[in-house]
Amino acid sequence: MKGLILAGGSGTRLRPITHTSAKQLVPVANKPILYFVLENLVDAEIIEIAIVVGDTADEIKAAVGDGSRWGAQVTYIAQDAPRGLAHCVFIAAEFLGDDDFVMYLGDNLLQQDLREFLGGREGAAAQILLCRVPDPQRFGVAELSQDRTTVVRLVEKPVVPPSDLALTGVYLFDKTIHEAVRAIAPSARGELEITDAIQWLIDQGHTVHWRQLEGWWIDTGKLTPLLEANRLVLETLEPRIDGKVDEASRIEGRVVIERGAEVVNSTVRGPVVIGAGARVVDSYVGPFTAVGPDCEITHSEIDHSVVLEGGRITDAGDRIVDSLIGKHAEIFRSGQRPRATRLLLGDHSQVDLA
């Protein structure tokens, strides 16, 4: 069995972070989202993996390499423009051959042992992973057979949902899907939709099975879900202090302080991860915060936030909460008169001055 990871999206909902970084490489608990996907596939003994890449191909290739650090063999497939999930299957046909494969969206995080999902597909051309959601109108939704054993219809963002079971972005296909993606036409937005390809399988008499996700599922493409994913992953931390903590500091709860990091006269209340080479001085770092490598937090307070590599927060004043701070971004209080808020912001930035 092979794996197909889709990592070609532009990440418009996470701008400005994704102006300079692939959305699949934005870290959760200091680990790029894409790494979780790779680990999940390899844990299921899927080691032949292709990654579909777009404009951020060079960055993804630099981060993943040949896959050997995970015990995998990674191939890269270029997609010239966003043309739909089914188009990714189409351009990966040579790599996939006649093998069964798992297709996995590269910006999704889910609490699921993939091996459980792979079971029980006998006789089916496809199997999809579904999750109960409170607002199915926002998702692609599956309608099930009367005995609830198979999928009979997929509906995209239905006004009247046939169920509360949403597609999570993890699929299992056999070779029949190649015929389906060749048979369908582009949707109204000009893309080859994987939901249309699966519906084609159903309409042609092929069986589509489903499995229900037992844990959580997060689409990390927006700030609030990304922070929620960060919280959920941090809650699984095993405490570890490999860096330096002075006697004037307090470390409470589940905290990871990586080698080369330093905490001076500060309180760190977990779950928190502080990356290698980071410094926390005369500060408070509160629960559900990930401080990336080589960051510096001085005379400041922060919680429920993600600070990416090289970020600097100095004399911030009010506590920073619910925030995503980009690579090498700086937040500081200069003491200049007259006192005022002075901003240098990129496109699509957001500032809440509550």
Image (spheres, rainbow, N blue to C red):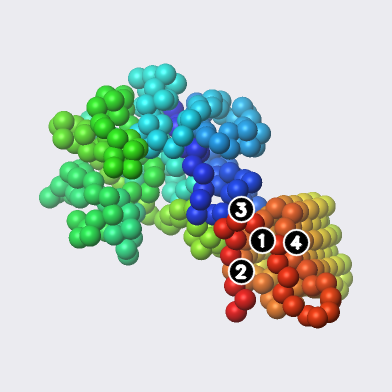
Classed neighbour count for the residue bearing mark 4: other residues with Cα under 10 Å, few (<14), some (14–19), many (≥20): some
**Residue 162 at least partly seen:** yes
Q: In this figure, which residue is indicated by the disc labeled 4?
A: 330
Q: Which amino acid does label 2 sit on?
A: Val
Judge left or right: residue 1 versus residue 43.
left
Q: In this figure, which residue is indicated by the disc labeled 1?
A: 345
Q: In this figure, which residue is indicated by the disc labeled 2?
A: 351
**Residue that appears at 58% across and 44% down:** 22
Q: Which of marks 4 and 1 is nearer the N terminus?
A: 4
Check disc 1 and report its element: helix, strand or loop: loop
Q: Earlier in the sequence, mark 2 or mark 1?
A: 1
Separation of marks 3 and 2 at Cα, in angstroms: 14 Å
Q: Is residue 156 above or below residue 323?
A: above
> Residue 333 falls in which quadrant of the image?
bottom right
Mark closer to the observer (1, 3): 1
Between residue 205 and residue 246, name the one nearer to us: 205
**Residue that appears at 43% across and 57% down:** 216
**Residue that appears at 62% across and 71% down:** 321
> Residue 248 falls in which quadrant of the image?
bottom right
Q: Which amino acid does label 3 sit on?
A: Ile
Q: Quadrant of the N terminus?
A: top left
Q: Earlier in the sequence, mark 2 or mark 4?
A: 4
Q: Which of marks 4 and 3 is nearer the N terminus?
A: 3
Q: Earlier in the sequence, mark 3 or mark 2?
A: 3
Mark closer to the observer (4, 1): 1
Mark closer to the observer (2, 1): 1
Check disc 3 and report its element: helix, strand or loop: helix
Q: Is residue 86 above or below residue 318?
A: above
